[in-house]
Amino acid sequence: MLAREKPSIADDGIEDAAAIVRPAAAEPATAPPISNVANRKNMLLLIQFRWIAVVGQLITIAFVQYGLGIPLPLLPMMGVIGALVLVNLASFAWLRLHDEISSAALLLVSMLDVFALTAQLWLSGGATNPFVSLYLLQVTMAAVLLDAQSTWLIVALSFTGFVVLVSFHHPLPMPRRWDGDMFSLHILGMLVCFIINAALLVVFITRISRNLRERDSRLAALRQNAIEEDHVVRIGLLATGAAHELGTPLASLSVILGDWRRMPAIKANAEMSQEVEEMQTAVTRCKAIVTDILLSAGEARGEAPGVTTVTQFLDDVVASWRAGRPAAALTYQNKFGTDLPIVSDTTLKQIVFNVLDNAAEASPAWVSFTAARDKDALVLEVSDIGPGFAPDILANFGRPYQSSKGHRGRGLGLFLVVNVVRKLGGTVEARNRPSRGASVILRLPLIALAIGAPHHAE
């Protein structure tokens, strides 16, 4: 049974505050690993970088050949550019056909980029070409994208290419008009190369760093989820053990109350008889709770599943909750629309009970429960006119032991609600209403409740 938690008192300054717990870090079974997601994004960045390199080389070759009048070996240089285009097309096709992009693939395309740069420099003056400093751009990209060993391999390739270009390259015949101004021409080339390096570094390193930060953020969220799920498992073990231990004393109490009901002194006293009946009802409910805990702990979805519909499930939940809490005023609206078959889930029923209990404790005079459909999701909203959520509760919504009740060990109710809904692939949103009170909205994907769906909320 889920723990109960009452919304904390909120002041008027946070009426529009809200907390949303999403399953963004909960990886589906078929989702690619987080590192692979970053590799795919980085491969796309390299593809974009290579397209820019192709366009930049074409512009540079045209400017040098026709603007400066320096003859270049156009055919082989165009062949290198064509090879870069083929590498880009092959990389894009690989992305479309394969889900996994390994670090080795990033290393391979980075090596091809170094070879292409070396070939172009060899054809256009070798180490004397001011664009030779583009090697530093390749090394910088490798340092961000690859591991240390692969980065040093790119460094070694770049160094080897530079050394080779010092001694072996295709000399360029310079027109006579540049004989006395070669240094100025070289400085101009270095300036253009510097601008290209700086611009590409700012654009692509920023985007690559953003990809890596997103990956680290998702990893941190997964670690937090793993800690919370371990906490849920331990709570489940404790709850199951407590249920076993409570079985015997509850049975003894039931027998004792049965004996009291038959005692003449109590039967003659109407007030005492009524109290004994209420005690017997409470004990019966406690035994039912214990039984539900044990069944939930030992029953897997698919073993004698309870097939029902959305409307029937919600009606049963509302009827059961009202029966156990007759003093609470509950307004129920079903706006789901066309009914759908689902598998009844005891755990899902308990989390709805939990949210309704929280609202009833904060606002016994009025609790609203609304069910609706938003595309492929079941949306359950529970509202009240109580004091609302305190800022610290909203800021740490879904964390264990966040309670306003002032008792140690409390505050597990919403924590378990969030974890169960997240396991189902849904979201939980808590917010304070504009006028008064609070609302908790559960958004559950219908596919997770469909017949034949795997049981996530164990």
Image (spheres, rainbow, N blue to C red):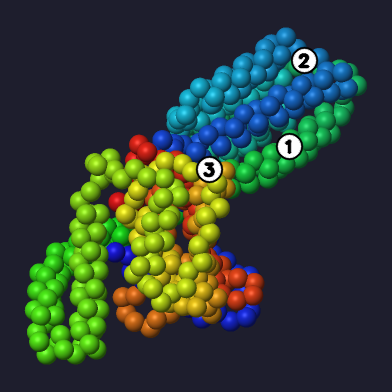
Q: Residue at x 76, y 21 (%)?
A: 58
Q: Position of residue 181 (x, y in %)?
A: 86, 29
**Along the line of sight, which residue is nearer the eye, 195 or 26?**
26
Picture layout, residue 252 above or below residue 244:
below
**Along the line of sight, which residue is nearer the eye, 253 or 200?**
253
Q: Residue at x 34, y 69 (%)?
A: 324
Picture layout, residue 234 above or below residue 284:
above
Q: How far is disc 1 from disc 3 in space, using C-alphas?
A: 60 Å
Q: Residue at x 78, y 38 (%)?
A: 191
The kind of residue on which mark 2 rests is Leu
Sequence-first tag of 1 and 3: 1
Residue 196 circle label: 1
Q: Position of residue 298 (x, y in %)?
A: 20, 51
Can the viewer see residue 224 in this picture?
no
Residue 338 circle label: 3
The kind of residue on which mark 3 rests is Thr
Q: Position of residue 352 (x, y in %)?
A: 41, 61
Sequence-first tag of 3 and 2: 2
Q: Position of residue 68 (x, y in %)?
A: 87, 22
Determine the residue located farthest toward the right in the rendered image. Answer: 177
Can the viewer see residue 311 in this picture?
yes
Q: Residue at x 51, y 46 (%)?
A: 377
For the residue labelled by badge 1, is the local secondary structure a helix, a strand or a loop? Answer: helix
Residue 72 circle label: 2
Sequence-first tag of 2 and 1: 2
State which mark lies toward you, 2 or 1.
1
- Circle 1 crowding by C-alpha within 10 Å: few under 14, some 14–19, many from 20: some
State which mark lies toward you, 1 or 3.
3
Q: Quadrant of the N terminus?
A: bottom left
